[in-house]
Structures are given as structure tokens and as C-alpha cells.
Amino acid sequence: MMERPLTQNIRPGRPPLDLAGYRLTGGYETLRAKLGRVDPADLIATVTDSGLGGCGGGGFPTGRKWQAMPPRATRPGPRYFIVNADEMEPGTFKDRLLLEGDPHQLLEGILLSAYAAQANIAYIFIRGEYTRAIELLTQAITEAEHAGLLGANILGSGYNLALHLHTGAGRYICGEETALLNSLEGKRAIPRAKPPLPQISGLFGCPTVVNNVETVCNIPHIIRHGAAWYKALGRNGAAGTKIFGVSGRVNRPGAYELPMGTPMNEMILEQAGGMSNGHKLRAVLPGGASTGFLLAEQLDTPMSFAGMAATGNRLGTGTAIVLDDATCPVAFIGNLQKFFARESCGWCAPCRDGLPWVAATLNAIETGVGRDEDLELLEEMTESLGPGRTFCALAPGAMASLQTGLRYFAEDFRRHITEKSCAWR
Amino acid sequence: MSTANAPLSAAEHAAIAELVAHAPTPRAACIDALKFIQSSRRYVADEVLPEIAAALGMSAAELDEVATFYNLIFRKLVGENVILLCDSITCWMLGSEKLAAQITDRLRIQFGETSSDKKFTLLPIVCLGACDHAPALMLGGTLHGDVTPARLDALLETP
């Protein structure tokens, strides 16, 4: 039987476990065993050893992120632990499952993570549209507060943690960790220059760690069972499990917890039940709108941060979007670029002015008024909006699908221009 | 519903003061304050913005900068029911443009517009995290997935 620690308590169509139910599964026992009894540095070491990477899409080692927090002795004063629950990456619906399915798992993860980072103030930054998750989290936080699991001297450990739930007012860019900090400070959500890292100068200039929902939900299991157990859950050299997903024209679109490193085609065939109604798969975006295309013949690639990097791509959020033969690839990329153009925060000129230009050019090609030189222009844009030209990863992320799409669907692009029409319309 | 451009009531002032009291800095409460004002007035009118700003210790320009940035803070009158129609990739592939056309046909509104009876406003929204139930939309704060033309008609009938 495959172990599924992240979703073990989640029953589709049923409300999540309340505090009593969560405790019956052994919930908060790890917290009781560790809080005030172990050195926070030991927890960081376990998480570092586990190989857990940031599940918001970056894959950066979580333990190393925590290690960058300055020691308490050298930096007294407030420090913050923040959960990024601003899930807005197109095609991504994994954090919603965890937020609505097992809110106490997240709270236990926050408590252990904040203790490890020696933070006494925590925030959950959740998008305002996640109304059901907000309701369930509010209930869970109230239960935890009444049971002495949040607040002062938690479980008699001497450790204090205040947890606040902040609901957003929109804008994709809030999911970028430094833009998120600006938003929490009551400012426009524009990214900050790094360095300094948030661990050195984060919320209100204080040491701050920002972690994704799924990352935090892994923590109780890693601390409870150890790094070796966690590593053994993965396949093809990867560690742990991950919430993957498939959307598009497949038989069973959904989110599934699978070993990290599971090959993409296995998920599409076995979990998603293959393509629906005789449609043919042309390519897949492996993890949201900011990842590049993976062609049908590359689908044996293991879904892990390293596995996808080996193909020059990124795992991203791990929720795959399928491009099928009934969908025009130019229009598909056009939709993605329109999204990025709209959601650019406007702080950097290449992103603010470049993305609308890209979107308009793609629209011209798709509607049959494109010119040959447009393809060169788009190619140039993938350079000038690529990594290193902007404060954050929004524009470089947008270029991933454009760059791979121009290469993989070159024939489709050319036909739109020569035939002055779209074969899918 | 209070008139959107009327001065803040004593109760509204008290509510903002409460938000400020619980925030690390007064300014950190500004998004919550804007959302609170909007919850009863439907939108944040230009006329009241300077008064909200003053209650937060901000200049009107500073608050306006925030209020114009976030897409769920409305700066002009919206209908009783705001339709947030997902137009991101999976919903687009699986029929969101047809749903938008159906809404335009039925209510005579395009994206960004409010119906003449002030019952509905139609807005595009980024991925709602319901791609396994595409196409999806939110109506009055409730998520609806697997929206077919028939279901959309029913939703617009009895919001």
C-alpha cells in the first residue's frame, strides 16, 4: 500500500477532521513531543536531510531556507513565519485540497516550522477567493487557540506563537514572496530586490521565512517519521510525496498524492485515466503556466525538481495542464501571455511593456494578421523578458511556454501566418 | 446598504479603529479596512477614500495607490452579484469564452460592465484553483465548477 501522508485524512466530499478527530489520528503528538524539548536546530537538520523542496514551484531546499534565519542571539526582536496560501498559478489546484481537506495538518506544520525558525508571529496569507478554505481555517484556528495549541506557553513548553489569517484582495503577484510581504505591510504588492533575503530583512524589516502550504503540510510527517523515511517515499532518486494533478481533456482530471519522481505518463494514464473522447495529447505544461512544454515523447520524465530540470524544464507546482489536438497551440500560448500581461504588477518596464506586446503579437498571428517577422520578434522577447532582466520571476516564467512553444509548434505558428487563418477556428 | 459616497458612519470609524488596533502598523490594516468598507457599500467611492486614509494615518494618495492595485477592491459601483469568471488556461480550453458570450447575450454586459438593473457585474478572474472542475466561476463568493450553459442559466436565474 502506497503511503500518502499528506492526504491520509482527506475524504472527498466529507468535511475535514476537527481537532478531536485530528488528534485521534495522532495529530499534534509530534508537536507535544518536540516543542520546548528539542533544539530548533535539530528540526532544521531533519528537514534539510529529508530533501524537502519548496512546493510553491521553486523547489528550493526548505531546510536551507530556514538555516538562513539569523541566530536569535545576533538578531533579537520579532521574527515571522508566513504561509503562502495565495494559490493562483493557472492550472494549479493542489493547495486548495490541503487547505480544505486537513486544516489542522497545516496548523501543526506551522507550529513546528515557526518553532524551528524561532518565530513567534505567524501569518497565513490566503487569497480572498478561497472562501471555503478561509471558513475552515478560521474554525481550526479557533479550536487550536481554545485548546492551548496557539498563543502563550503552548502545551506548557514555554513557546509562544500568535497566528493571524490574512485574506488577500486579489492579484497573482501576491504569491511572489517579497510582493506578499509588501501586501501584508499594506502596500502595493510589488516585488523587492533580493538580496537582502526575507530571512535577513523580511516583514517590517524583520527576519522572515515564507513557505508554501504544501511544503508546511509535509513538516509534521518529516519530523514524526524522520528524514530517512521521507526520502524512501520518493522514486527515481527523489524524496517524499507530492500533490500532483492533471487538468484538461483527460478522463479523470484531479489532484493525486504520488511519490515524488513518478513518471508523468504514469500519472496521466493511471490517475487521470488517459485522454477523453479520443483526443490526442500534444504536450503538457508540467506545473502551471510558468513552466515550459513537455512533448508527448518526453512523458516518461520523472516528476521531480531534478527530473524536470534535466530536460531543461521546471516541475513548477506539479499540476499538469494538457494541450490536446482540439486546441490551437498559438491560442493556448496566447491565453497564457494575456494572463501574464494582465497580472504584471507594472514595477519593471520589460514586464509591464513587453508582455502586452507579446500577447498582442500572438493574438495577431492567431487571428490571421501575423507577419513573418513576428516570429523573430517573439524569439527576441524570450531573451529580453528572460531571467535576470526583472525583479521577480513573473516575466521569465511567462517566457517558458513561449520559448518552448515557438520551437515545438513552429509549424503551427508558420501556418497561421502563411494561411492567414487558424485551422482550429 | 449605506450610500456609497456618504461620510463614514460612527460604526464604520469604530470598525476601522478596531482593525488598526490589531495590526502591527496602522497601514497594515488598510486592505482589511477597504474590504470592510466595500462589504456594506459595494465599492470604495472616491468621496470616502480620504476619510478612510485619515483613519489609517495615510495620505489619500497612499491609500489610492493600494486601492487601485488590488482587483477585488472595486472603485465604482458593482452589481448586487459579482460574477468572477475564470479565464485562465484550463477554463479557457474547456469553454469559458462560451460562458462569457452567454452572459453577454443574456445580461447585455461585457467584462467590466454592470447590468442596467444593477443586479450583476461580470469580471474576469485568474485561475480559481478548480481546474479539475473547469470551467469554473464564483458568484457572490461561492465557487461553482463544471459550469454548463444550463447550469449558468440556472445560476443567473436565482443568484
Image (tube, grey):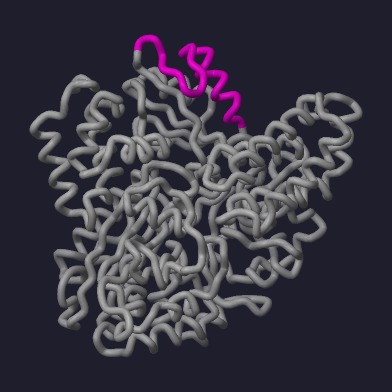
Total marks placed: 0
Q: Nearer the viewer, residue A309 or A146?
A: A309
- Above or below — where is A49 with respect to A321? below
**Which quadrant holds the N terminus of chain A?**
bottom right
| Left or right: A233 in relation to A83 | right
The residue under the point 31% across, 79% down is A75
Q: Nearer the viewer, residue A282 or B148?
A: A282
| Left or right: A146 in relation to A27 | left
The residue under the point 60% across, 71% down is A260
The percent coordinates of residue A218 (x first, y second) are: 44, 71
- Above or below — where is B98 with respect to B52? above
Residue A24 appears in the picture as rendered: no
**Which quadrant holds the C terminus of chain A?**
top right
- Above or below — where is A309 with respect to B51? below
User: Quadrant of the rendered structure where residue A46 is?
Assistant: bottom left
Residue B76 appears in the picture as rendered: yes
The residue under the point 21% across, 71% down is A149
Q: Is residue B157 magenta?
A: no
The percent coordinates of residue B93 (x first, y second) are: 65, 36
The residue under the point 42% across, 27% down is B83
- Above or below — where is A74 with respect to A330? below
Q: Is residue B116 magenta?
A: yes
User: Quadrant of the rendered structure where residue A67 is?
Assistant: bottom left
Q: Residue furthest left?
A: B10
The percent coordinates of residue B124 (x first, y second) are: 50, 31
| Left or right: A338 in relation to A412 | left
The percent coordinates of residue A106 (x first, y second) are: 36, 65
Span shown in magenta: B95-117
